[in-house]
Image (spheres, helix red, strand yellow):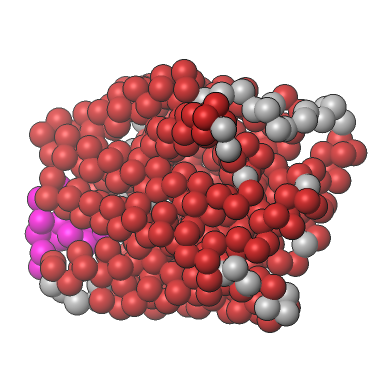
Amino acid sequence: MNAVDSTRVRKIRIALLVGALALFALLYAPQPVLPQLAHTFQLSPGTAALLVSASTLGLAVAAIPLGTLSEAVGRRRTMVTSLLIAEVLGLLLPFVSSFPLMVGLRLVQGAAVAGLAAVAAAYLADETGGRQLGTTMGLYVAGTTIGGMSGRLLGGIVSDFAGWTGGVLAVALLAAVCTVLFVVLLPTERNHHRQALSWAPLLGGLRAALRDPVLYAPYLVAAMGMGSFVAVYNVLGFRLTAPPLLVSPALAALAFLAYAAGTVTSALAGRAADRWGRARVLLTGLVLAVLGLLVMLADDLVLIVLGLVVFTGGFFAAHSVASGWVGARASASARGQASALYQFAYYGGSSVGGVLGGTAYGAWGWSGMTVLLCCWLAVAAVGVWITRSHAGGAVVAPAQAREPQVASES
């Protein structure tokens, strides 16, 4: 790689890191203030969680259309336009006083950010693929964890003295800075050849992404893993601020520092998958997530935080490998659609899991919710194991050996 290409790759990585920070800060801005919102609007935990689930539902529904559209109009244009619209809606949200209207606004905002979430992996695979794809994708996912952590942490702390409106506005302003950097830094794609806006080739790519049985394992990990993850973080504030713990909202927000574990493990998992194979690292991440949930059963703040760190690290390790697997496995003509399908599973799981998890917590408490989430993660692990066997071991071969094959197939 020459100096020009090396500089371009660094710009891409930095741009997508700050873009991911903005995206995830906006997407989950209400999450740390759900207890305050529930109190203000007299809502149950499950109903308050609709503010998070609405945005992820919008993203899930819009991911495939926008991922497909990016094949025709260009990946950069799709990502930039999407993030700008989402930012404008994020700045409006704190000034809305009707809960149903807030839910509707969040639904549209989620649909807007789908253009970045669904296309980023395909853009990375096109522009910085090859042997470094696992590492590059790991760094991108690490950026999503930074966005998730900083947005939740900032919103939770500010809300303790400025209310939920101040917390959500603070996150929107942080995202605005990152959005500007993203627009300025992200280069126009070089390696993606736009297709004519014709249904036949675009739907052909979607069919190709659906017909590959190996891709169903990462789709399943996305749905079950993200459903479990959002359920935990949606109700965490309710558990920490209620008896017997009675933690203040500002201190409860510090629990979101557990996202730092995801920042580390997502980057490490990408490298580990390049070396030891995707299925092996995926299963390890899912096992760690289950262990973290079991540790969190104790009514002890230290153990809850420790379990949260392990759970978060395990989830993001699995997500990093699963998302990179999709980008490497799919053919060039189906890469955008395969990435969009992954995002559909990821955020569809978030929407359903967030509501079901909050409902389970309200009905059966933290222990009942934990049983449900462990079952979801077990289903994901079985899916990976079956795919591993179905592929005759190819999936567990070192990813470095596979990447040139994927590039040649492209």
Identify the residue at image location x=34%, y=77%.
291
Q: Quadrant of residue 26?
A: top left
Q: Position of residue 328 (x, y in %)?
A: 66, 54
Give the tally of numbered discs. Answer: 0
The residue located at (71%, 67%) in the rendering is 214
State the image coordinates of residue 126 (x, y, percent, origin top left).
Answer: 66, 39
Residue 60 percent across, percent down from the top left: 59, 46
Residue 274 in sight: yes
Examine the rendering and report whether any part of residue 349 can be seen.
no
Front position in the image: 404 or 231: 404
Find out whether residue 238 is within the magenta segment.
yes
Residue at 55%, 26% in the rendered image: 4
Vertical placement of 340 versus 103: above or below?
A: below
Q: Relative to residue 198, is residue 40 drawn left or right? A: left
Vertical comparison of 110 with 260: above or below:
above
**Split into 4 quadrants, where in the image is the N terminus?**
top right
Examine the rendered structure and indicate whether residue 381 appears above or below residue 226: below
At 31% from the left and 72% from the top, the residue drawn is 292
Which image quadrant is residue 390 in? bottom right
The residue most toward the right is 200
Left or right: 187, with 395 as reference point: left
Front-most of residues 9 and 330: 9
Asked if residue 93 is among those painted magenta in the image, a careful observer would answer: no
- Which residue occupies the foreground of this view, 369 or 260? 260
User: Relative to 135, is 173 on the left or the right?
Assistant: left
Looking at the picture, how far across and down is residue 154, in whole percent?
Answer: 22, 37
Q: Main secondary structure of the magenta part?
A: helix
Give the residues drawn in magenta, as a range: 232-249
